[in-house]
Amino acid sequence: RRKSKVHTETMARAVDHDFHPHDLDHDGEAHFAKLISRESAVTELSAGRLMGNYILFSDEYVPVQTGAALYRALQTHSSKGTFYSLGSDVHCLFYRPAEALAMPDPKECFHTLADHASMTGRRFEVGYAAALETFCEILESRKEGLGGCWFTAPGESSKEAFMRRLKRSDPAYDIYQAYAEEHSERWASATALTLDQALAEMPEIERKYLLECQEYDSVLFGMSEELAGAAKLESEQLAKLADGDELQAQLDSGVFVAVEDGACVTDADSVAKSIHAFEAKRDKAVDTIMATKLPSLDRKK
């Protein structure tokens, strides 16, 4: 239906399929290799974000980083569970319900993610969403042969399943292995909190979590080879339009849409200043991250 609409509106004789190059025969291999590489980079960045607060592999717990998430956890899983802290340097509390959490199904996870994207003003491209949902259906089909499991073998933890599936030749293998060991060490010394103690800690945790969200963009567009190049090119294009007094016309016509704190920014000068400020903050954040030493990885060396 969407492709038919494009054909009708543009009167084009041929329209490329979603996520396909114009010349599939000559450019297909390079195009799909680049697409896979980008997806791998996004997956690694997402895993890294979870690892920063020991959320990855903590599947028996509900991670809580905001006041709204805390109340949501209590409402969904009753208030008979226990909160845990992994230390003041971890910007997250963990809620363990009285009843064990079941492993969610892949399709359920996809629908939750898609709903969240839609409710926050974003939406997956139709072709991408269809491919991702089909992949989740394939994962879910494993349950028939694995006794109801789709990711772990019966009696296996998600940590064990992840490390079993991860190839030792993977460049990030040592990082994940060091994280798995550190994750176990952290949980061995976890501290149980009362509800009052959890409520008292939540404002500071939420403040730091929001700062993390802001800095995450710096990591995305400053350190990822797959994303940094395109981001730099787009920044240069916007800067060139601003210098030539052409950016305001592009904003007025809707060619570009700038959004800040949920509101549209229509002034070209404000957009240009925001770009320069972000680039300065990004470079500073990258320098700080690259100078950080990880004891667990140093021990591996």
Image: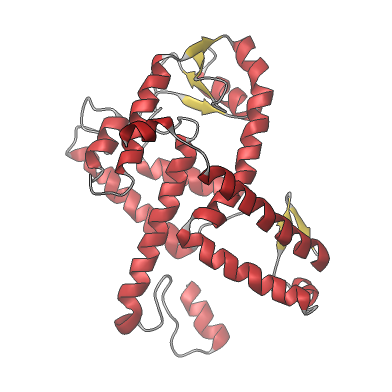
Q: How is the image coloured?
A: secondary structure
Left or right of 185 in this view: 268: right
Q: Which residue is drawn at 45% across and 53% down?
A: 42
Q: Residue at x 48, y 42 (%)?
A: 112
Which quadrant of the structure image shows residue 128?
Answer: bottom left
Left or right of 176 in this view: 190: right
The quarter in which the C terminus is drawn is top left
Q: Is residue 286 visible?
A: yes
Question: In the image as oriented, which residue stretches furthest toward the left?
Answer: 145
Left or right of 243 in this view: 185: left
For the residue pair 23 and 7, the one nearer the viewer reads as: 23
Residue 142: x and y in percent read: 22, 42
- How many marks the image carries: the answer is 0
Q: Residue at x 74, y 49 (%)?
A: 261
In the rendered view, tell whether residue 234 sits above or below residue 12: above
Residue 199: x and y in percent read: 65, 17
Residue 64: x and y in percent read: 55, 27
For the residue pair 221 and 40, the one nearer the viewer reads as: 221
Residue 212: x and y in percent read: 60, 39
Which quadrant of the structure image shows residue 235?
Answer: bottom right
In the rendered view, tell whether residue 52 sits above or below residue 251: above
In the rendered view, tell whether residue 185 sits above or below residue 244: above
Q: Residue at x 41, y 82 (%)?
A: 22
Left or right of 209 in this view: 133: left
Q: Can residue 216 be seen in this view?
A: no
For the residue pair 149 and 256, the one nearer the viewer reads as: 256
Which quadrant of the structure image shows residue 91?
Answer: top right
